[in-house]
Amino acid sequence: MIESLSLTKYYGPKCVVDQVSFQVKPGEVLGFLGPNGAGKSTTMKMITGFLNPTNGSARIDGVDVVKDPINARKNLGYLPENGPLYEEMTVEEFLRFVSSIRNSTRDTEEQLSAVEDVIKITHLEGVRHQTIDTLSKGFHQRVGVAQAIIHDPKYLILDEPTDGLDPNQKNEVRQLIRRMAESKAIILSTHILEEVEAMCNRVIVISDGKILVDETPESLKQKHPHYNGVELHLSGADIEGIERQLRDSFPELGIESRDNVIEILPASKESIQAKIFNYIHENSWKIESIRPMATPLDDVFRTLTLDPE
């Protein structure tokens, strides 16, 4: 597994990562979230051995990344933020170079086969003979992903892997990560909250260098005030009368109306949609629709990380 053990980092008197501890096992995709400056990239750099911690330690597959960095990194793939590449090389030349290092125990034919595999997986066929400095940001990012997975590592740390990609390319990378997650432990940093729901089965939110929450995306959504709420969309109905009857019948629920919509919130986050639907049917009310209220992770993230001052 990937282990972060009370990782702490000071720059002068400023503590940017404060005793961060967690584990990531194969089959887990951990969404590592936080506002700019929260300590996400610094934590990932310490886990990968690119930065030494002030205190604490990190282990990859049980190997300490500071005491034995070469063995720790053998099973690790890393895409850093704004990952540096050899711009004067073509895509194919660069990936052959990386494969010769990462797959040094394999013969030349296997090294070249690994290059062909990642070119196909990351859809770099059309630019394989271009120098990296001529690539768009999206293709540049794909080359970064390719070098991270070229040795088929058991562990992946990806800092903003879809940055600069268009919607189709983002979807391709998400599908790739989901496929790899079946057998790998993955830490994924992103500012795009929809990616967390699409790819991650666990979320850590970090702010001011400290972990605020460590749970599943669904558990995180339960912190939203509208979780399991429903909306009744009405047109031409007696909205005030319906609202009054609902209040009388369900005094434990939060019920508010706006325009042609009645919002109904559960008392304890329990599911109420079936109960409300059956009640509507019993009363033969004609409504346009009944639907779940939106509970975007963005709202929960802002609530957790914004300074109340």
Image: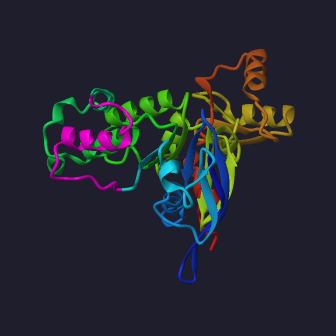
Q: Is residue 121 above or below residue 16?
A: above
Between 200 and 127, the one nearer to me in the picture: 127
Q: In the picture, which quadrant includes the C terminus?
A: bottom right
Q: Is residue 88 magenta?
A: yes
Residue 282 is left or right of residue 5, and the answer is right
Q: Residue furthest bottom?
A: 13
Q: Is residue 33 above or below residue 126?
A: below
User: Image point 72% across, 26% down: which residue?
Assistant: 273
When asked about the image quadrant of residue 282, the answer is top right
When asked about the image quadrant of residue 116, the answer is top left
Residue 204 is left or right of residue 76, and the answer is right
Residue 221 is left or right of residue 32, and the answer is right
Q: Is residue 89 magenta?
A: yes
Image location (x, y in percent) of residue 19: 67, 65
Instruction: Report the coloring of the rendering.
Output: rainbow
Residue 189 visible somewhere in the drawing: no
Between 165 and 79, the one nearer to me in the picture: 79
User: Image point 49% across, 65% down: which residue?
Assistant: 51
Q: Is residue 70 above or below residue 120?
A: below
When asked about the image quadrant of residue 1, the answer is top right
Between 5 and 246, the one nearer to me in the picture: 5
Q: How many numbered marks does the figure carry?
A: 0
Span shown in magenta: 82-108
Between 91 and 38, the one nearer to me in the picture: 91
Q: Is residue 213 above or below residue 150?
A: below
